[in-house]
Image: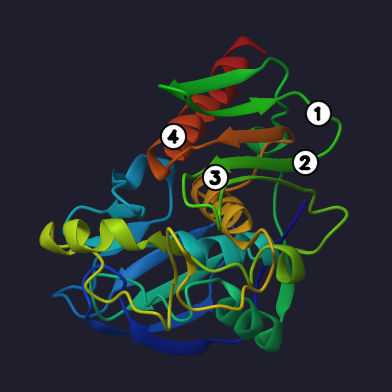
Amino acid sequence: MTQLTLKSEFELSGIGLHSGEQTRVRVLPAAVGEGRYFVRVDLPGAPIIPAKIEAVSQTALSTELAGIDAQIRTVEHLLAALAGMGADNARIEVDGPELPLLDGSAIVWVEAIAHTGLVPQECPEDSTSSFVVSEPIWVRHGDAFAAALPSAETRFSYGIDFEEQAIGNQWYSWSPEVESFATAIAPARTFGLARQIDQLRQAGLIKGGSLENALVCDRSGWLNPPLRFTNEPVRHKILDLVGDLSLLGTWPKAHYLAYKASHNLHVQLAKALKSQAWAELKAS
């Protein structure tokens, strides 16, 4: 078995979506088998927060992870970039409570990873990494759902439906074997609805959100066009799903299908997948 890590480190900085705080991130190579993990270098003892499904502590409009003495928020875009580019092992040093949103997509992270490059690492085979979804797995909330279906290829399909006409009903299906993450998914930016902004800010969220780092839509259309794709919003939802499922370490081969889902449903699906993987391992 071969894993990949970065050839060398890179550094980026920017404003956090929810905290509004400026943070700096250094992404460094990590040893084989260490996986992807965060280090809060601004805190005493530089506590480590693993990028694992067990570490999820909150999923309100972003995914937050917690270790013993620290939390890190809005991890999904960087994790999607690392997973989408194939980086299995990475040490991520952050000097604040939230990763920077950058331009609202994963493309800046992807370009930094591509510029730095990746190197192979030989490792012993992990029995859970070869897990294949043999039975459908579904999680639901109202009319929203996320699922993993048996498939001969890995594929991510997503649907969204908004009353704002500029978004409306969108579906997109992405196969990493056909289209690269860097071109099909990474450039898609996060998006928001103008009618929700005041309420979210009163709740202490999106303090760092702006027309520079998020697409914003009202009933008359987009406030900050042009879009990078005609269906940029649903592509961004796939980006979020990729980031959240990366907390499994590796994706089981499956067709991942989601509709009107959320970070919470993504995480529920990941937990259900892990439970099935361990159940099958014990039974074998």
Sequence-earlier tag: 3 or 1: 1
Left or right: residue 119 versus residue 212 is right
Provide residue 85's location: percent of width, then percent of height.
69, 67
Q: Could you classify mark 3 by the number of other residues whose Cα lies within 10 Å: few (under 14), some (14-19), or many (20 or more)?
A: many
Report whether residue 88 is seen.
Answer: no
Q: Residue furthest front?
A: 220
Q: Which residue is mark 4?
A: 265
In the image, what residue occupies the spot 52% across and 29% down? 274
As displayed, is residue 32 above or below residue 163?
below
Which structural element holds mark 2? loop
In which quadrant of the rendered image does the C terminus lie? top right
Which structural element holds mark 1? loop
- Front-most of residues 57 and 6: 57
Amino acid tagged 3: Leu
Q: Could you classify mark 2 by the number of other residues whose Cα lies within 10 Å: few (under 14), some (14-19), or many (20 or more)?
A: some
Amino acid tagged 4: Leu
- Front-most of residues 4 and 64: 64
Which structural element holds mark 3? helix
Mark 3–mark 2 distance (CA, rounded to whole Å): 13 Å
Q: Which residue is mark 1?
A: 151
Mark 3–mark 1 distance (CA, rounded to whole Å): 17 Å
Q: Are marks 3 and 1 in contact (CB under 8 Å)?
A: no
